[in-house]
Amino acid sequence: MLDPTPASAAPAAPPGIVFAAARLKLPVEVHALVGSTENMTGAKAYRPGDIYKSLEGKTVEVINTDAEGRLVLADVLTWAARKLKPDYMIDHATLTGACMVALGPYRAALYTDDDKLASAYLDAAGAEGESIWRMPLDTELRSLLKSPIADVKHIGGRYGGSITAALFLKEFTEETTWMHLDIAGPAFLDRSHRRMPKGGTGFGVATGVRFLESLR
């Protein structure tokens, strides 16, 4: 369970899932990784047009400095794939406003190439009453991430922004079975909705725990 944590968005789902799994004594090995960093300006801050070298080795052209979370998450994904070698690698991220444009504030987007994993996770979400919608990893949009000066750009443009963000992350997952949950909408609400409170909602914890229970 993975979580990039820029200053403006700190979903607590992965640690919550691990704590719950421990208290329930689920017979599975599960790790929560939090990629946390300062989000401040300074002499060493990156700028549009800079080239960032990722842990995976790919170079990334910086387009918009507000999209720092996906750079952090990219390295966390690579580290987890190489060091932990998990059966499943699932990230929760308040990654894009585009996801909220597409699905509204109460539903998360799910991205994966693995149909079995997607089905199991959607079943868990349905059982727990959390709204998650599977979105396409549309490879035709991969061309929007092409860069003339680096291996990849970290933003694909205005259209399909949630999809291209997921495609960017996929570049750093190695060969691991991976799923991306864009929880930008339901992670933090300005008013209560159903069982979700105002403020930080803990969205995704119940689904994650139910999914882990299904692995027993």
Image: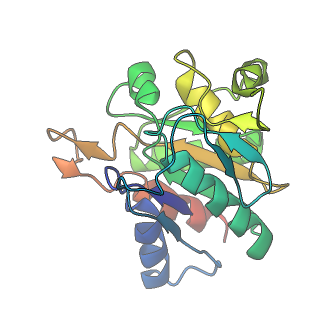
Q: Quadrant of residue 36?
A: bottom left
Q: Quadrant of the C terminus?
A: bottom right
Q: Quadrant of residue 146?
A: top right
Residue at coordinates 40% horizontally, 34% vertically from top-left?
Answer: 107
Question: Residue at horizontal 54%, vertical 24%?
Answer: 161
Q: How is the image coloured?
A: rainbow
Residue 45, placed above or below residue 164 = below
- Quarter of the figure that contains the N terminus: bottom right
Q: Within the image, what quadrant is residue 57 found in? A: bottom right
Whether residue 193 is situated above or below residue 159 in the rendered picture: below
Q: Measured from the top left, where is residue 122 in percent x and y? A: 57, 42
Placement of 47 over or under 213, stated as above or below:
above
- Residue 197: tell me if it is visible: no
Residue 205 pos. (x, y %) = 42, 59
Left or right: residue 86 compared with residue 184:
right
Q: Is residue 206 left or right of residue 122?
A: left
Residue 69 position (above or below residue 86): above
Q: Position of residue 109 (x, y in %)?
A: 51, 35
Q: Residue at x 76, y 75 (%)?
A: 83
Furthest residue toward front: 43
Residue furthest to the top: 159
Name the residue nearer the viewer: 47 or 136.
Answer: 47
At x 76%, y 65%, the residue is 81
- Residue 44 seen anywhere in this rendered image of the structure: yes
Q: Nearer the viewer, residue 76 or 179?
A: 76
Task: Give 31 or 61, whichever is nearer the viewer.
Answer: 61
Q: How many marks?
A: 0
Depth order, front residue of 62/18 = 62
Residue 158, position in %: x, y? 52, 17
